[in-house]
Amino acid sequence: MSVVSTMKKDLQQFYEEYIGEKEYSSGLRPQTVKSYKEVFKHFTTTMYEVKNVEDLTIEMMNAFFKRIRTRTRIVGRNTPKVGLAHSTIKTYANKLNAFFEWLVIRHYLKQNPLKNIKIPYPEYTDSRALPNEDISKIISAVSLHSDNPLIFKRDTMMLYLLFYCGLRKGEIIGLRVIDVDREKRLLTVRPETSKSKKTRYVPINPTLLFHINEYIQERNKRAYKTPSLIVSSSRDEGLTTHGVKHWVKKLIKISGVRFHIHRFRHSFACALDQAGSNVSSIQKLLGHSDPKMTQSYLRSRKAEDCRDDIDRLSLM
């Protein structure tokens, strides 16, 4: 595979040019840029012999996938684990593919080395959704361990927002007061906070609306001015990423339920499916561009969960 351009840049320099363009012209979020860089760093560390564009061959890419599937790594408390998860490998392939396509478009590379390599779509077998009893434990923990009325109502509203809207962490942090139309019962997820870079709207469940109203009323008593919907525990400003991490750690400790925010998103998808929503509607509410991703969120639904669907079948 030959390089069309004779520019004397190594692969790292080309990648810096690529990621700089993606960051500013495509408006990628800092966290997304960070994830792209981490994938490229892992690729160059694993494939130490790949230094230049002309080293990007089909053979090298096959060697890369073989290495990350078979290499032993240490996770958790010094626990050895062989290979990366299939979903992680798929993510790596997608992000590297975008870079290789950029090289081809810029005529730095004749052909994308991933073009003829088929990466299997990952099959998910683990359950990511939180059981209802665990969600109830987390909500009860907030009720029992909140002395400050504002923080109690804020935390309660946040939990219901996560369950009834399926928001990502960045989306819930980025919510503004004006994004919540309580009259029309409609929540707006703005493109600058959304992973898809598209605006999406989520209808507000009546139970959630009640808790939003309770929180807003308590917030107004304190004359908070920040445009952010979710306020800090101690200041008139929005809750930060660090603040959310601290919030999750606190709830894990007092509830005894190990979780992360994204599991509520899976719970939201599964609850919609169980309520009879079609995949197209769930996809729209989650903001997915690929229905396969939506299907992967529904993997927590078990055969026994569909018993009522089967019982409703009739030939009459």
Image: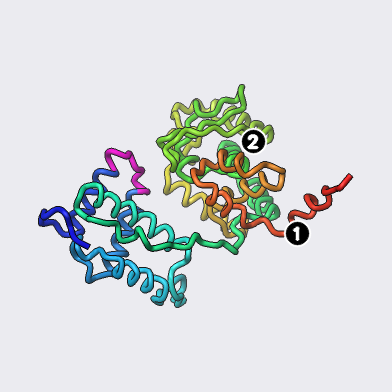
For this view, does 258 lie left or right of residue 109?
A: right
Which portion, as a residue range, is magenta? Answer: 23-32
Three-letter code, disc 2 = Leu
Judge whether residue 147 can be spotted in this image: no
Three-letter code, disc 1 = Glu
For this view, does 20 lie left or right of residue 96?
A: left
State whether the magenta stretch is mostly helix, strand or loop. helix
Choose between 245 and 194: the one closer to the eye: 194
Are circles 1 and 2 on residues that touch, CB within 8 Å? no
For this view, does 268 lie left or right of residue 274?
A: left
Query: Which label sits in the foreground, 1 or 2?
Result: 1
The quarter holding residue 303 reads bottom right
**In terms of sequence position, does the residue under pointer 1 or pointer 2 come before the other?**
2
Which quadrant of the rendered structure holds the C terminus? top right
Question: Which residue is found at the position 43% from the left and 72% from the top?
Answer: 83
Name the residue that disc number 1 marks.
Answer: 304
For mark 2, give the secondary structure: helix
Choose between 307 and 59: the one closer to the eye: 59
Q: Position of residue 64 (x, y in %)?
A: 33, 69
Mark 1 neighbour density, 10 Å: few (under 14) some (14–19) many (20 or more):
few
Q: Is residue 87 above or below residue 167?
A: below
Number of the label disc, if any, that sits on residue 193? none
Mark 2 neighbour density, 10 Å: few (under 14) some (14–19) many (20 or more):
many
Q: Position of residue 76 (x, y in %)?
A: 46, 70
Choose between 39 and 145: the one closer to the eye: 39
Number of the label disc, if any, that sits on residue 208? 2
Distance from label 1 to label 2 (Cα)?
Answer: 28 Å
For mark 1, give the secondary structure: helix
Q: Position of residue 144 (x, y in %)?
A: 66, 48
Choose between 290 and 58: the one closer to the eye: 58
The quarter holding residue 146 reads top right
Which quadrant of the rendered structure holds the N terminus? bottom left
